[in-house]
Image (cartoon, grey):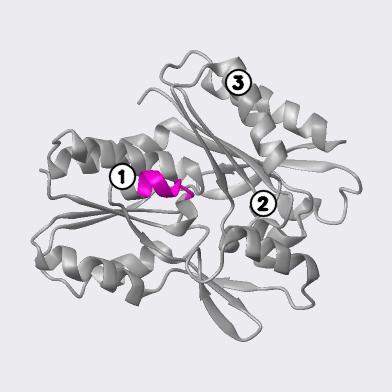
Amino acid sequence: MSGIAIVTDSTCTIPDDLIAKYKIGVAPQVLIWEGKTLYDGVDMTPQQFYEKLAQASQLPTTSQATVASFQKLFAPLVQQGRPIVAILLSSKLSGTVQSALQAKQDFPGAQIEVIDTDTVGMALGWQVLLAARQVEAGASFQDVVAAAREAKKHVGILIVVDTLEFLHRGGRIGGAARLVGTLLNFKPILEVQDGRVEPLERVRTRAKAMGRMLELVEQRIQGHNNVRISAMHGMAEQDARSILEQAEAHFHPIETTLSWATPVLGAHTGPGTLALSYCVDL
């Protein structure tokens, strides 16, 4: 069904060219800073965000993508008679899924499926792209929904942060809360598990953390085919390019992407963040 529309939110970190290619609708997350409400990736670029963050006396807070944003995305699609599949970040990290479900109620009778992916970043993005490519291939609404729901079993994301302070302040770190204040010079490696950010290991240096992250990804993709890899960074492009090049040499992925952590993601992870997302068997 060529008329199916795919919608996601700005934490997907899908590169702009792919968003445009597949005509994916994106609901922006909300950044609140110095009394101003800013929409993720709309009112401030990632580079502007991290440059401002480095000098800020007041740190930003965030809010979920609004009901109004989803209403704005849904309304023209419903008017055109197009079914909608909204594929969104973990409901354990944000109220975005709830915003989408609330917006859906304003369109009774419309074919709108809201999917909680239990993840974020390109682990979310790979699921969105899978659905978009199913649409492009002519899959039915039911098949697109089924494929999107199945995809969450095939993706993952590992994250290295310079400090847990941003995640701790935002209440997004689950079991990693116990590590705050104990890391000293260690770099924490985190993973999104069952929709929450959880600690895996502590590594002494950033270089060792990057190497260990590659080892952990290798463990998770071992024995699988059609590997896709994405690197994401918060003002650490050189490290992101380096780790992506190493991943390409080690894993021979069929597709790679490189992206910034958006302002809203950066508000929770801080500068220097580095992440590797993977997708297999799809």
Comparing labels 2 and 3, the label whose residue is closer to the camera: 2
- Residue 189 in the image: state x and y as whole percent: 72, 39
Indicate the quadrant where residue 211 lies. Answer: top right
Task: Work out whether mark 2 precedes mark 1 in sequence or the reverse, and give the earlier one.
Answer: 1
Using residue 250 as the reference point, say whether residue 97 is left or right of it: left
Residue 110 in sight in this render: yes
Q: How many marks?
A: 3
On the rendered image, what quadrant is the C terminus found in? top left
Q: Could you say which is closer to the camera, residue 174 or residue 220?
A: 220
Q: Amino acid at mark 2?
A: Gly
Q: Could you say which is closer to the camera, residue 9 or residue 41?
A: 41
Residue where numbered disc 3 is placed: 218
Residue 74 vertical placement versus 120 (above, below)? below
Using residue 89 as the reference point, say whether residue 5 is left or right of it: left
Indicate the quadrant where residue 57 lies. Answer: bottom right
Using residue 68 as the reference point, say whether residue 94 is left or right of it: right
Residue where numbered disc 2 is placed: 234
Task: Work out whether mark 3 precedes mark 1 in sequence or the reverse, and give the earlier one.
Answer: 1
Q: How many neighbours does mark 1 have within 10 angstroms: few (below 14), some (14-19), or many (20 or more)?
A: few
- Residue 61 in the image: state x and y as whole percent: 63, 73
The answer to whether marks 3 and 1 mark residues whose Cβ atoms lie closer than 8 Å is no
